């Protein structure tokens, strides 16, 4: 997905009162490595990561998830094998959403990637949990989510946002490419099985990234010479670990083996104003209504009923 340029940038080193005054700004903390944390309280998460725009890997956020033992290739093949999905394919000519996709049912896709003989790189990167809500019963909301998107009436959410929880069943060495989530919301990546290699770049690095055309794992510096000035931060995300990616951080994730993961986007008090500004920029009328719909869901339902949104 393409990025939105934020209205303002600010590096950190400020008091609590300044943080609250800066919620309408994009704030981040430069890092040299991604910290791994366990037994992290919500207050610590807000203070040390969310409020200062700093990524973190939480190693025990999923420890009680049934998905860790239940979700595997055989499970998805037997329970959802007949469902058609758009699979990212780097070698076909069917264009959709700026990427290249091919339609396959999930059983065939899993057979292909398990065979080890496929000459294509295929990635089922968007299997919406919202279409199969029973799957969320195998997960538990980590305390860190506090997802304000759930304040929005479901029918409005599906019309304008679609889904923020995607199961990703990925073939070894595949990726959706370098990108920045366009709504300015918080991104979470959870690994159910397998392992991912991650490259993160803070928002101020955007000028070196050629709108996401760079392959961070094998950059072509002749074609993209400015990337030599970028400061990527790499980490490995293992089974049972969850990565928090703050708003407007660029990220490139590659599956190091056949992997099942969950990509989640949330909105909280620290990203709400940035998300609102994004909606306002894309559609001024509906953007002005966004705060009312979040605060007073019944108003959103009424506006939808009379066709005003």
Image (cartoon, grey):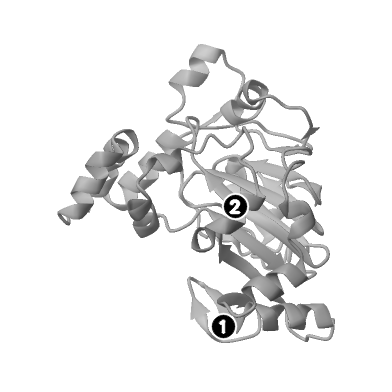
Q: Position of residue 192 (x, y in %)?
A: 75, 55
The percent position of residue 71, horizontal first and vertical second, equals 73, 60
Along the horizontal axis of the image, is 22 left or right of 65?
Answer: left
Q: CA distance from mark 2 to mark 1?
A: 24 Å
Label 2: element kind: helix
Image-based side of 166 in relation to 48, left or right: left
The residue sitting at 61% across, 57% down in the picture is 135
Furthest residue toward left: 306
- Above-or-below relation of 113 to 282: below
Q: Nearer the viewer, residue 57 or 214?
A: 57
Depth check: give the residue in front, 10 or 296: 296
Residue 134 place in picture, x, y as percent = 57, 57
Category of crowding for the residue at label 2, using alpha-carbon neighbours closer than 10 angstroms: few (below 14), some (14–19), many (at least 20): some
Residue 103 got which mark? 1
Query: Label 2 belongs to which residue?
Result: 136
Side (left or right) of 145 relative to 171: left
């Amino acid at each position: 997905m393409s990025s939105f340029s934020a209205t303002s940038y600010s590096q950190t080193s400020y008091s609590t009162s300044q943080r609250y005054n800066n919620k309408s700004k994009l704030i981040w903390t430069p890092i040299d490595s991604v910290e791994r944390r366990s037994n992290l309280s919500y207050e610590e998460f807000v203070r040390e990561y969310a409020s200062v725009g700093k990524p973190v890997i939480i190693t025990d956020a999923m420890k009680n998830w049934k998905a860790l033992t239940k979700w595997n290739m055989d499970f998805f093949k037997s329970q959802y094998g007949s469902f058609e999905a758009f699979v990212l394919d780097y070698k076909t000519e069917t264009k959709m959403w700026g990427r290249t996709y091919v339609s396959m049912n999930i059983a065939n896709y899993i057979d292909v990637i398990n065979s080890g003989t496929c000459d294509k790189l295929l990635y089922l990167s968007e299997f919406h949990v919202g279409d199969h809500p029973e799957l969320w019963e195998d997960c538990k909301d980590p305390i860190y989510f506090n997802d304000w998107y759930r304040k929005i009436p479901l029918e409005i959410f599906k019309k304008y946002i679609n889904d923020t929880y995607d199961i990703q069943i990925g073939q070894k060495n595949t990726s959706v490419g370098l990108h920045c989530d366009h709504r300015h919301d918080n991104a979470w990546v959870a690994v159910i099985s397998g392992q991912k290699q991650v490259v993160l770049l803070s928002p101020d690095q955007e000028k070196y990234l050629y709108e996401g055309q760079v392959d961070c794992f094998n950059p072509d510096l002749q074609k993209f010479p400015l990337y030599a000035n970028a400061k990527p931060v790499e980490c490995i995300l293992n089974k049972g670990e969850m990565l928090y990616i703050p708003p407007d951080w660029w990220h490139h994730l590659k599956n190091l083996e056949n992997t099942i993961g969950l990509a989640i986007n949330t909105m909280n008090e620290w990203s709400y104003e940035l998300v609102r500004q994004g909606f306002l920029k894309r559609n001024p009328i509906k953007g002005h209504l966004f705060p009312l719909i979040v605060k007073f869901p019944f108003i959103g339902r009424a506006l939808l009923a009379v066709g005003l949104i």
